[in-house]
Amino acid sequence: MRRSQKILDNPRGSKVRALLKSMGYSDYDLQRPLIGVANSWNTIVPGHLNLRQVAEHVKQGIYQAGGTPIEFGVIACCDGVANGHQGMRFVLPSREVIANSLEIMAQAHQLDGLVMLGSCDKSVPGLLMGAARLDLPSIMVVGGPSLGGCEFDGRSADITSLGEAVGMVAVGKLSQGEFSQLEERVMPTCGSCSFLGTANSMGCMAEALGMSLPGTATIPAVFAERYRAAQASGRRVVEMISEQLTSRKIITRESLENAIRLAMAMGGSTNLVLHLLAIAYEAGVDIGIEIFDELSSSTPHVARIYPSAAANVPDFHQSGGVPALSREILPLLNRKALTVTGRSIGENVENAAKKDDDIIRSLENPWSDQSGLAILRGNLAPDSAVTKPAAIHPDMQVFTGTARCFDSEDEANRAIHERQIQPGDVVVIRYEGPKGGPGMPEMAGAMKMLYGQGLALKTALVTDGRFSGTNNGCFVGHISPEAAEGGPIALVQNGDRITINITERHLHLEVSESELNRRREAWQPPKPKSAEGYLALYARLAESAHRGAVIRHRQE
């Protein structure tokens, strides 16, 4: 018996039926599977603006297949609007709220299945986390990327071009008039930002996990194909209910390894390390950050998308998208992993074809033998740190420099804006981790200003905070333990020497252990930055970045 039948098909269900009928549902509607359509549509996140129309097509598909859609809203934040101020501290913690709200709505109303609509950085992982926790028939539908904007700096512009342009204006490379014109032209359509940031990376991860229909992750937001995919997803979820194909049959260790492989092969956002660990936790799959390290050693960089190259995500879509890339790396994948189609990933992509070698190459002829993502360790990051070799120039994969320490993102941004950072410096931004931030904000602005000032190949940045998926230069984030927990990054002093060796996966502070012990004894925990509200709660409960920055809710 379906979940909804248990609360509708009995004498006590008359009250429930009456409540639903008050909104226009008929007996005919209530005899069909009730499918929740979790819609994160709003008018502040460009990646979600089209989700109202996408939802209508999802609902059409549900009706066509014999189900009844029940639509409800889910929050979503825009990293771009929230970036560079207090709002960014709320963005990563919003992921847990999204997962919780999906669970609450599905369980309170005993829905039979779910179609989840999201596009951006925390909405997609949050919805996938909730789906994994609930273990209902569920399917993810993303809104799709925006189209690229005007040409700027040798490529199609996107919203990150403005961050680079700020630095260019500061050093006289760009006039204020040119900057103003750029603002009007960088993002000509709605959709998740057109580069391979966290939003599009996680859309691709949803497909790689098997939780979205093949080929749907990268359909541009303004394409009619996006609506057809939404309708097909609505039809498919009804079939999944009769097949009893639930999320935990799809989100398994094998499918998570597939997603990690794809992330490595395409050089996805560093943030997806946090999110895949969190999804694994919700699915009850016991994996740690070590799996990223293990798989990176045997996964080459096969597809290049900005910030690794000039091509954007719509270009990647035209080149064949996730199915084409998956087929190229199929020997590395768990090809029998089940997907929402009811077929395996191997069956889904066996006939996929790439357009050419301009974006997607083969395992035999990759862009680089080195993985697109990497986990570093060393005395500065005993538990781990995350970087993105795919976005780092080969000349910067080994870098030694002098520490310039800042105890907040704001302090660092002011110093960079005032041109206090010199070639050979390693900018250290700390107390910005899950607990210290709190909320682990992105350091996107700092890296973009360094790039704009011509320092991308002359400086580096390390932090216990996060980065935007579009950052390039030499950067290492997610340093664990974080400064607020007394991690070694809290002990760094101006003038110390730091070596980043991405090739050997090493991050080293060139200070003796005896000196570090002396500094550790003198260190005092800082006062919490947030004493009340949700951030204070998150700071108390959140795990370290190397555990996905999740709020654990199960007794281990």
Image (cartoon, grey):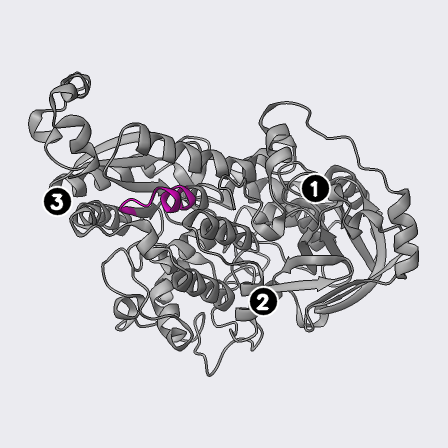
Q: Earlier in the sequence, mark 3 or mark 1?
A: 3
Q: Which residue is mark 2?
A: 293
- Magenta span has 371? no
Is 456 left or right of 312, judged from the image as shown? right
- What segment carries the magenta color? 127-138
SS at mark 2 in the image: helix
Q: Using the rendered view, name the quadrant where residue 269 is placed.
A: bottom right
SS type, badge 1: loop
**Residue lying farthest to the front in this orientation:** 556
Q: CA distance from mark 2 to mark 3?
A: 43 Å
Between 525 and 507, the residue placed more toward the observer is: 525
Residue 291 visible at all: yes
Residue 99 falls in image quadrant: top left
Q: Which residue is mark 3?
A: 65
Outermost residue to the left: 28
Task: Give the quadrant of the N terminus.
Answer: top left
Amino acid at pointer 3: Ala
